[in-house]
Image (cartoon, grey):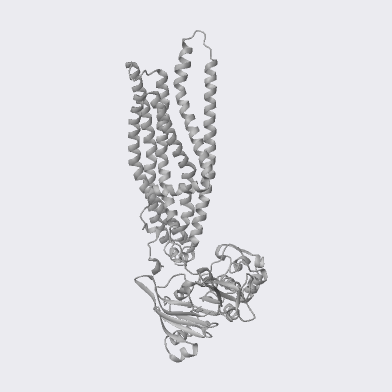
Amino acid sequence: MPGPMMGGGRRGRMGGGKKAKSPKKTLSRLLAYIKRGYSAKFFVVLICIVLSALANVGGSMFLRVLIDDYITPLLAQANPVFSGLLRALGMMAGVYLVGILSTFLYNRLMVSISQGVLKTVRDQMFAHMQSLPIRYFDTNTHGDVMSHYTNDTDTLQQMLSQSVPQMFSSAITIIAVLAAMLITNVWLTLFVILGVFVMLRVTGKIGGNSAKFFLEQQKSLGKVNGYIEEMIGGQKVVKVFCREEKCKEQFDEINEELRLNATSANTFANILMPIMMNIGNLLYVLVAVVGGTLALAGVGGGITLGVIASFLQLTKTFTQPVSQISQQVNSIVMALAGAERIFDLMDEESEVDDGYVTLVNARINADGSLYETPEKTNVWAWKHPHDDGTVTYERVQGDVRFFDVDFGYTPDKIVLHDISLFAEPGQKVAFVGATGAGKTTITNLINRFYDLADGKIRYDGININKIKKADLRRSLGIVLQDTNLFTGTIRDNIRYGNLDANDQEIEAAAQLAGADDFIRRLPEGYDTEIGGDGGSLSQGQRQLLSIARAAVADPPVMILDEATSSIDTRTESIVQRGMDGLMYGRTVFVIAHRLSTVQNADVIMVLELGRIIERGNHDQLIAEHGKYYQLYTGAFELE
């Protein structure tokens, strides 16, 4: 279903309609999570990285001292004394131990930091997802949304725990080594910098191509997840129509797209490291040749054997972090692509709610006025704050009225035209008509799943835009045609309608809905565990549980959208008796294809192409011999 008019029909993410954000902005946004919650730990990480880098550089610098100040003099002595050499080796062992412990500590800390950041990101992403309007889920596949929590966060975990500390370590090592190289020999340093410049040019060329395909890979992965999720949910339909082969063909197409993008991304990523290593090895050899040549020629500032050995080690230490940075670029690019998708979701505009009228439990004073109470009562009231600071309470009646309402899911396709209707307190209003006539859309507007294009809806005389959405929806009990149950017990699923309900209230709601009988025949009764969406129950049993869930909420207004469509005729008669008890004293909106279920409605609205073409009670509409008469008699001919 397209997005509603007020939201503007944005393209789904799978189409890649959004332009990529700046990688720098995405990275800084990620690092802000570390700064907010883990700045002290990250500061320790940076200190450990510096110690590790300095220990690494110190080892390379020690080679010159070892050769020139200890080994060469000892070779010239007839009776060498090794005590000084041993002390120097002991000191260097201590330096290396500090480096090893620092490396171990910062890696452990980064694992803790990365997991903490990911938990915060997932929490914020899930919390924000709860605030998104229904139109977002209409325009994005569930599988693609799921991939934000799995694939995209996995790439983030790798980046935060490995790539980020490796990049910091490499950067500090490069700075420290460069300083050590300049101290050791300026001419050889300039030669190494020239080689590194070549390495960076190669990295930029190959890394840029890799980044492009890694972003496409993440999008393709979302498509694959979305398709798999759809096929799992629709397996019965696939098998009924023998579409297994067609599904395999379609999956092969999107899986091939993923393969091509992943192959291209990883081809560039995999060739980068070998190329960098070979350039580094070549530079190592050239430094040895150039250093030896300068030493033999007596130029370059007095190059000794110790200087050459030390510089060769420094060269290795210098090119290694450059290669590591090149290698980590791919992980960072892929992680930033995932982070960008996560932030796209988190940047989606939340459902707008400017309401200020709230729903409260109330008691009645002796003079008939109302006052608010935290205790549960059988009296609901609208709490209405005013500009002058006063608060008034009005008892919820359940009076719902539409005034000249137009609505379209997209601006170019209006699906409801000039809808005006009223439901007085305690009335049962039924909507009938062909599929697509607009029946469910009307009920979606009552609970503000979508906002109007034009017109207004008043609830007890209050414009529904002024009622807080959570309170508006709390006043509406809704039973949908498609039942949604959750993993847990039968009791938990009924309690979902009212989390404060006790066991007696849950069982009373089940009895009212006609579900108590089959529940008690289950192995554990109300404590029977059911899987996701109640797969172990029949469709009719699942529908009975959804009716019980609405009953336990005890709302002043009920919306029944094909509530008995999945129930057989015998069960329907049982449920109908319970529903009559549930509907007593409440305003009820009923959508039904079985016209026999709406004969006792106070008013029946007949819709066609988004317009109300007939209205009246059953006898009046039958007497008119119009569209309702045709639908009713046709239905009974079929029966």
Residue 423 x/y as whole percent: 50, 82
Where residue 551 appears, as percent x and y from the top left, is 59, 74
Most foreground residue, 205 or 239: 205
Q: Quadrant of the N terminus?
A: bottom left
**Residue at x-position 46% and y-position 51%:** 152
Q: Position of residue 494 (x, y in %)?
A: 60, 69
The quarter of the displayed image where residue 533 is located: bottom right
| In the image, residue 231 above or below residue 605 | above
Q: With 111 as the anchor, is 511 left or right in this view?
A: right
- Front residue (pair 155, 389): 389
Please tell me which residue lies in front, 573 or 130: 130
Left or right of 64 on screen, residue 572? right
- Quarter-of-image position of residue 581: bottom right
567 displayed left or right of 284: right
Q: Residue at x 40, y 58 (%)?
A: 13
Establish if 231 lies above or below 518: above
Residue at position x 49%, y 33% in the image: 52
Q: In the rendered image, is residue 517 in sight?
A: no
Res. 235 visible in picture:
yes
